[in-house]
Amino acid sequence: MLPSRSRLSVVLFLAPPLLLFGGGVLLPIIQSLVLSFFEWDGITRLEFVGLDNYRTLLRGDPVFWTSFANQLVYLAICLLLQVGGGLLVACLLLTILRGRETLKVLYLMPAVISTPAIALLFQRIYSFDPEGLVNTILSAVGLDSLARAWLSDVTTVLAAVSVPEGWRFLGLYTVILYAALLAVPRELEEAAALDGARAWQAFTRIRFPHIMPVFITTLIMATTYALRGFDVPFLLTNGGPGQASELVTTYMYKTAFTSGHYGYASTISVFIVLECLVAVGLILLVLRRKTD
Amino acid sequence: MSRDVTQRPRRRPTRPRARPTRLQISQVISRVLIIAVLVMQVYPFLWLLLTSLREREDFAASNPFSIPTTFTLENFSRALDQGELLRNIANSVVITAGSCLLLVVCAMTGAYAITVLGFRFSGLVRGLFLLGIVVPVQVALVPLFLDYSRIGLLDTHLAVMIPLAGFALPMALYLFLAFYRYIPRELYEAASLDGAGPYRIFLRITMPMSWNTVVTVVMVNAIFIWNDFVFANTFILSEELKTIPLGLQNYIGAMGNTDWTATFAAVSITVTPLLLMFLLLNRAMIYGLESGASKG
């Protein structure tokens, strides 16, 4: 604590971040919460409906539940590619001696490309006519029968819109987990090797427990990002065909800005916040307890 | 199989010949996997660049994934003719610069007030900000849209800058908080004895020392802000204010008769500056990512 500080100086320094955070984040959250109890088309008067929106959401809206199930699949694919893939690639990087830094940078490259660019790229990669990259590879290895229009086929579209999101941030999680793995004390690993621990045991008993705090952080990051994942599906398919790739987030967006049901859309966005908080709570509960 | 590869302690020069065959096999496998991932991460981008340099007829007629035989820059001029790319780029520059400035100023002053000045409820304020890390941006879309249209801020650069900086603030504040803890107290005490007040100490000591953190925060966030789609798509309505992600969206819509080579040229134009900056300054960004997560 600075001895010469005055109350005014504290207020002055604290004002800009509080104004920005209050106006841009906190106030909208409160407004969403309030709006979720109203019915409003944006033009006529607000109409208080109590818990009606929540009742509709939980009981009478099959589209919402479809989109929620889709969001969980999207989450699973993203976690597998980002945290699972990131951990694997980080471990692989440790096995080589040269070029690690360069590889890290190259792995991060997709994270720099904007979503519409990625959507354009994948639209072309998935396309059936003209033949896209996926179908070209399939026919090259003799699996022509599997070739299809990946984005219009209801059985594949959800996975097809999830993969680009997982792919683009693989490098991000690799970089974070790699830094954590580097920080594992060499002595611990050497002691394990002397005790005759097999490579897999050394990983599960020594390295992984040691990077657990960072692993929890990356898991929380990846989970909350996937639960609010929006732009790739929105741009590639806009939830279609039908509701095959509709996510809670795209559904909320359409409810507000296409259908103009601002109250109900706020209810869905409150649900998204709760979903994130519950997910973070679960991760902490399960993994923290394990480490203790 | 890959499991075996992964856990070998790195660098084991003392026992290279202990189990030669197994070591070699696992090494080969890990290298193959590393290269496979490299191709996966880099190839789509190279393909994008190559396609933007191909002739339109060549791309349409032959296999689009083959190596082109002739190159042309004509796609780029068509791309510039078709869209509003230059205006989009200017808008993106304004919004990214504005958001980053807002973000850095707020994060710096906030961290200074919390760590250096200190006040009674500083722990509470800190917790309030950090809670923002898990808040999904979607929750702000509807209320901000309504608020903006009420106060006439809808369809302005500022409308996008406020939530972009606001949602990035918790993480940036966190990085500054972590860094300010390393500045020795003695420095502040000495300055105080010399009669420097809180403003002077901020300008003369804290701010000059935090440039590294500023670079890190800007690098990490500039990429996400530059690429923002959700806020820009919601709050910007008129053509003149559209950013690059919105401008590119115009190319997506026209399915069927899409001019792919020109589209990819447009994508290349928008991606290249950011990529060059990233390749030059990636150290700062990677440092930010690593320290941001490991201190969490």
Image (tube, coloured by chain):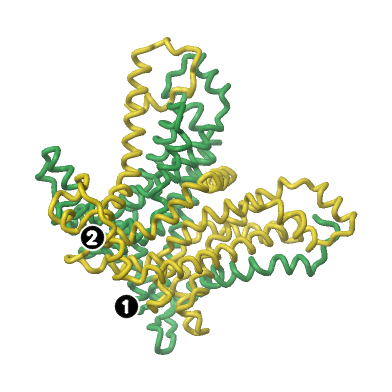
Chain colours: A green, B yellow
Dots 1 and 2 on the same chain: no
Residue shown at 55% from the left, 18% from the top? A191
Nearest the viewer among B10 and B271 is B271
Label 2 Cα neighbours within 10 Å, binned few <14 / some 14-19 / many ≥20: many
Q: What residue type is labelled 2?
A: Trp
Helix, strand, or loop for circle 2?
A: helix
Nearest the viewer among B260 and B237 is B260
Asked whether residue A60 is in view, the answer is no
Q: Quadrant of residue B142?
A: bottom left
Query: Which subunit holds the residue at mark 1?
Result: A
Q: In which quarter of the image is residue B106?
A: bottom right
Q: In this view, does A147 lie above or below A256?
A: above
Residue lying at the far top of the rendered structure: B18
Label 1 Cα neighbours within 10 Å, binned few <14 / some 14-19 / many ≥20: few
Q: Is residue A87 above or below residue B185?
A: above
Residue A126, percent across and down? 21, 53
Quadrant that contains the N terminus of chain A: bottom right
Helix, strand, or loop for circle 1?
A: loop
Residue shown at 27% from the left, 54% from the top? B53
The residue indicated by pointer 2 is B260
Residue shown at 36% from the left, 76% from the top? A257
Residue B281, percent across and down? 52, 48
Residue B34, percent across and down? 36, 33
Label 1, label 2: how far apart the Cα atoms are: 32 Å
The residue indicated by pointer 1 is A259
Specify the label residue B265 is tagged with. none
Q: What residue type is labelled 1?
A: Ser
Residue B192, percent across and down? 86, 56
Nearest the viewer among B46 and B140 is B46
